[in-house]
């Protein structure tokens, strides 16, 4: 028979399998429906035609797209990569980077890596996040919400690692800024602020000297954009083909459906294994009981043989006569057959 502890272990395994599937499907972050997706690994050669060079000093390397600004040549402009498509509705944008070198600037608002999400670049209506070294030598994460003819609003948080991720999310009209460094398992929220629900013109990642002259070298490692819609993403569509966001939404629907079916299938397999082991234990127990009954039955049918104490001749009687008085067929003497009296 299968022990209760073994059954518990098997059922626990089934639970872990289904939980692991859910975690794999949910690892992209929050569970809001963001069907349109753009993800690119920036290590190695360019992998997407949807990214445009902005500024100078971008070199593609195996370790990441490298932004190199020499410094000492007057105020420098931001340099990096920008999408050739926009972002509509709620979104979740994550930028992975590595700072190789960032000199302390003598002026400006800080030198480092940045994630820039403009509504309208001309009016400076944008949200941004950066990891900078400031003029006083502090290394910080800083969020910013800027608009034309208004003072920018943001928050700052100390940074201790040269490698990390920056994240900007939009939920309704609220922008949320968060960051992750080194081996940290989760993002830390830096700031939440009223933003806007109008479309984003593009997404730009790279190095930003902050109006200073300090040398800067960073690597752009990866960019992930999830949104309700990504207008302009996907290039030329075949005639009658689905829109990019619609195609991505279908892919996510099938992914979730397939993951759910896989979890149910795994659970059914475990249930079948448990049922098989239980059935096998019951069959084995039934065979053992049947064998014992057969042995007992056989012993009950074995004839009893003994010798008459009067004439010394053999007497053979049925097993049911064990313990009873038997008359010798040879001499007529009455004697008790050996064995226990049957009930």
Image (cartoon, rainbow, N blue to C red):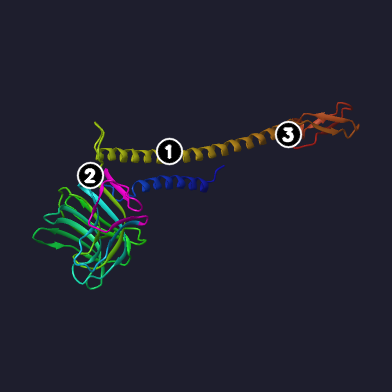
Mark 3 or 2: in front is 2
> How far is disc 3 from disc 2 in space, using C-alphas?
85 Å
Rendered image: mark on residue 265: 1
* Left or right side of 41 for 212: left
Mark 1, other Cα within 10 Å: few <14 / some 14–19 / many ≥20: few
> Where does the image place residue 327, in percent across and percent down from the top left?
83, 28
Which range of residues does the magenta coloring cover? 34-63
Q: In what element is the residue under mark 1?
A: helix
> Where does the image place residue 41, in percent across and percent down from the top left?
33, 51
Residue at (46% x, 45% y) in the render: 11
Whether residue 232 is visible: yes
* Left or right side of 297 for 22: left
Q: Looking at the picture, tell me which residue is in the foreground, 306 or 206.
A: 206
Q: Quadrant of the C terminus?
A: top right
Mark 1 or 2: in front is 2
Mark 1 or 3: in front is 1
Q: Residue at label 2?
A: 230
Of mark 1 and mark 2, the one earlier in the sequence is 2
Residue farthest toward the right in the current orientation of the protein? 311
Mark 3, other Cα within 10 Å: few <14 / some 14–19 / many ≥20: few
Whether residue 343 is visible: no
Compared to 200, does 243 lie above or below?
Answer: above
Magenta highlight on residue 43 = yes
Q: Quadrant of the N terminus?
A: top right
Q: Looking at the picture, tell me which residue is in the foreground, 95 or 154.
A: 95
Q: In what element is the residue under mark 3?
A: helix
Q: Residue at label 3?
A: 299
> Where does the image place residue 73, in percent across and percent down from the top left?
21, 67
Q: In what element is the residue under mark 2?
A: loop
Of mark 3 and mark 2, the one earlier in the sequence is 2
């Amino acid at each position: 028979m299968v022990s209760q502890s073994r059954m518990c272990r098997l059922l626990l395994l089934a639970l872990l399998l289904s939980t692991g599937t859910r975690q794999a499907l949910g690892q992209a972050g929050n569970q809001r429906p963001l069907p349109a997706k753009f993800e690119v690994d920036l290590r190695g050669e360019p992998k997407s035609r949807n990214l445009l060079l902005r500024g100078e000093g971008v070199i593609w390397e195996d370790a990441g797209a490298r932004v190199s600004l020499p410094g000492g040549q007057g105020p420098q402009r931001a340099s990096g990569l920008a999408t050739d498509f926009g972002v509509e509705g709620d979104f979740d944008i994550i930028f992975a980077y590595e700072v190789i070198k960032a000199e302390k600037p003598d002026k400006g608002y800080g030198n480092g890596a940045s994630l820039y999400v403009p509504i309208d670049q001309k009016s400076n209506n944008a949200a941004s996040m950066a990891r900078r070294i400031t003029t006083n030598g502090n290394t910080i994460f800083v969020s910013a919400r800027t608009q034309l003819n208004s003072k920018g609003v943001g928050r700052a948080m100390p940074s201790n690692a040269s490698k990390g991720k920056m994240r900007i999310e939009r939920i309704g009209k609220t922008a949320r800024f968060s960051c992750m460094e080194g081996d940290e398992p989760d993002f830390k929220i830096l700031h939440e602020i009223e933003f806007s629900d109008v479309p984003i013109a593009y997404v730009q990642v790279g190095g930003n000297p902050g109006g200073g002259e300090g040398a800067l070298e960073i690597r752009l490692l990866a960019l992930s954009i999830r949104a309700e819609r990504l207008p302009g993403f996907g290039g030329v569509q075949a005639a009658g083909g689905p829109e990019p966001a619609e195609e991505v939404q279908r892919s996510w629907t099938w992914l979730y459906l397939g993951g759910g079916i896989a979890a149910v299938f795994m659970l059914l397999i475990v249930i079948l294994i448990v049922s098989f082991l239980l059935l096998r234990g019951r069959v084995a127990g039934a065979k053992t009981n049947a064998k014992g009954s057969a042995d007992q039955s056989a012993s009950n049918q074995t004839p009893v043989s003994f010798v008459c104490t009067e004439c010394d001749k053999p007497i053979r009687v049925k097993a049911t006569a064990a313990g009873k008085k038997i008359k010798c067929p040879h001499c007529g003497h009455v004697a008790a057959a050996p064995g226990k009296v049957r009930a």
